[in-house]
Image (cartoon, helix red, strand yellow):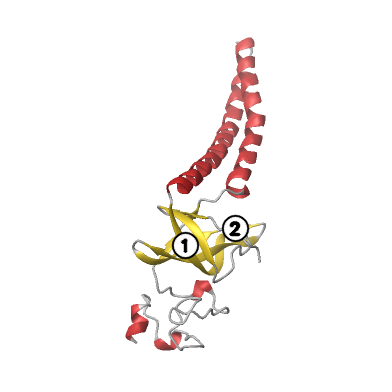
Amino acid sequence: MSDIRLNNPHKKNPEDVRSCPKCGAPLLSEVCQFCGTYIGEVATADLTPEYPLVECKNARLGFWNVGFPLIFGGIFLCVSLPMFLISLFVDSAFEGSGNMGKSMTLFTIPFMLIGFVAIGIALRTVFRHLQVKKHGVERSGVVYGYMDDTVAYNGVNGQKVKILVDTSEGKKFILLPLGSTSKQYEVNSTVELKLKDNWALILTKKVNW
């Protein structure tokens, strides 16, 4: 009972804690913490981790966090910026001829702001990626499992990968959204990653399976 409470902050009852089929130890993760047996049928979301669980943000560059904002912002700016310049020309060339120029200016400003914000998001992501890659601490981790993200892509939930990392403060689980619906790294495999603050960047080449 003491071992269960030590590794179980939610104080589950003994009958609620599953046991490893190989050594009989209380099962608190996808991989037995005593004998290393991988328990494939256990859902990551239903487990109480035996180590602290840290939610991280992904510093990887991808279509949804860089490509899509650039395309989205570029389209808005390509349409609104010429209209904004035309409205300034109309307003100065035909001064006193009505409010047409001012109306066009007011109409295009929100679209321009959306475009600049979208491009700013993409640039900030690139900057964060470079910061983590340059100043992040390199660590090795073991992939323990996956769980559904709250973000969906084309109606399908994205995946978060759960990785056990040995940090300067001891072992910790990090939960990292992958920005994809696929499970990109093999369970029980070792991955190399860089950590900075609450950002993480996996350096190991992904394997779709």
Residue placed at 34% from the left, 63% from the top? 169
Image location (x, y in percent) of residue 139: 44, 59
- Say if 60 sits above or below 88 in the image: below
Tell me the residue at 39%/85% (across/down).
Answer: 13
Asked whether the viewer can see residue 12, the reply is yes
Task: Tell me the kind of residue under disc 2.
Answer: Lys
Q: Quadrant of the C terminus?
A: bottom right
Tell whether label 2 touches label 1 (CB within 8 Å).
Answer: no
Residue behind mark 2: 205
Q: Amino acid at mark 1?
A: Ser
Could you tell me how far apart the alpha carbons at marks 1 and 2 are, in whole angstroms?
A: 13 Å
Left or right: residue 177 compared with residue 94: left
Q: Can see residue 94?
A: no
**Secondary element type, mark 2:** loop
**Point 39% across, 71% down: residue:** 51
Task: Label 1: state its secondary structure.
Answer: strand
Q: Above or below — where is 150 with respect to 103?
A: below
Question: Which sits in the foreground, 36 or 144?
Answer: 36
Mark 1 nearby-residue class (10 Å; few <14, some 14–19, many ≥20) = some
Q: Check residue 103 in the rendering and tell me which mark sits there, or answer none.
A: none
For residue 128, side relative to residue 63 (left or right) = left
Quarter residue 43 falls in: bottom right
Q: Position of residue 75 (x, y in %)?
A: 66, 35
Q: Is residue 66 left or right of residue 53?
A: right
Specify the label residue 140 is tagged with. Answer: 1
Residue 151 at x, y percent in the picture: 57, 58
Crowd tier of the residue under label 2, counting other residues whose Cα lies within 10 Å: few below 14, some 14–19, many 20 or above: few
Q: Looking at the figure, which quarter contains the N terminus?
A: bottom left
